[in-house]
Image: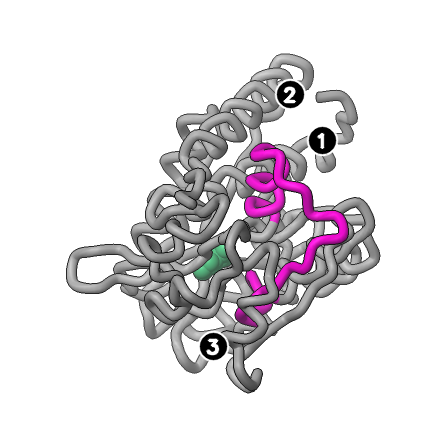
Amino acid sequence: MTATVIDGKQIAEQTRAEAAAGALALSTRTGVIPHLAAVLVGEDPASAVYVRNKQIACEKAGFKSTLHRLPANTGQAELLTLVQALNADADVHGILVQLPLPKGIDTTLILDAILPAKDVDGFHPENVGLMQQGRPRFLPCTPAGVMRMLKVSGIETAGKHAVVIGRSDIVGKPMAALLGQKGADATVTLCHSRTQDIRAFCREADILVAALGIPQFVKGDWIKPGAVVIDVGINRIGDKLVGDVDYLPAAQVASAITPVPGGVGPMTIAMLLANTLQAAINLSGSDAR
Ligand code: GUN
């Protein structure tokens, strides 16, 4: 079997076009232009690229985007003051603090300080709770992007065994929650660094989501023939980007697979736009799209 390649770039483009159309409709109706404020602390080159790409996507979709760049030695109090100012700024609809933050800053404290109505990453505990209860305000962008890819690709999740590798707050935990929720209806196993014999769990997966951050961790012969493989990993080996799945052997066995790059990555940004538009609609009190 050779897998169908799930084209994240194309699905993301479509999602971004919908966000752009929504932004145009909102501004025509109300004069409100969705505005994402991104905060980047320190000099991490990968984070700088991610934030830049988020800004470019905003601008292409007709959103406003502002970047607040702070040096690596920024104190926690100073960052907190900036978040509070963005919370209070009526012109800002979405706030994104790029992670990871430098050592010495309490990430939880900062994320908890973001106004839940502007938390377009979906990381605030109030939004995590709403998602867990199946009445989401904002879904975390990467898992939401994976759900959209599955839907657009016509991949059935109901009754399927979904195995998620990795239990991060950003991807693994919310991914498992979304796949198991009513409507998605998968039976979910969440594997992590202390799981014994991960390979055995992978072999049982109808849908396998790899989100552990180890290059090419999942081998081709771990994959059940005909399974759907979603690779969330973005790892740099020299000047090459690879996922958490050993792509070529996996693509021989799977029925569908996401490539790296061009798979899940572009979806994260597209869903951020969708969330920022939703935040602008909610905050402007405009309920039509
Ligand atoms: N760092 C890696 N992924 C993300 C993300 O989705 N949001 C933020 N804020 N930081 C990240």
Dividing the picture into quadrants, the one containing residue 48 is bottom left
| Mark found first going from the N terminus, 3 or 2 | 2
Mark 1 lies within 8 Å of ligand 1 (Cβ measured): no
Three-letter code for the amino acid on which mark 2 is drawn: Leu
Residue 40 in sight:
yes
Residues at discs 1 and 2 in contact (Cβ within 8 Å): yes
Magenta residues, start to end: 144-172
Quarter of the picture holding the N terminus: top left
Three-letter code for the amino acid on which mark 3 is drawn: Ile
Q: Is residue 282 left or right of residue 69?
A: right
Up/down of 14 relative to 42, above or below: above
Dividing the picture into quadrants, the one containing residue 174 is bottom right
Which residue is tagged 1?
284
Q: Residue 43, how many percent across, how many down?
A: 28, 64
In this rendering, which labeled residue sits more in front, label 1 or label 2? 2
Residue in front for this viewpoint, 1 or 93: 1
Which residue is tagged 3?
105
Give me the disc on residue 26: 2
User: Which residue is depicted at the point 43% across and 36% down?
Assistant: 7
Residues at discs 3 and 2 in contact (Cβ within 8 Å): no
How far apart are the two marked residues, 3 and 2, measured between alpha carbons? 37 Å
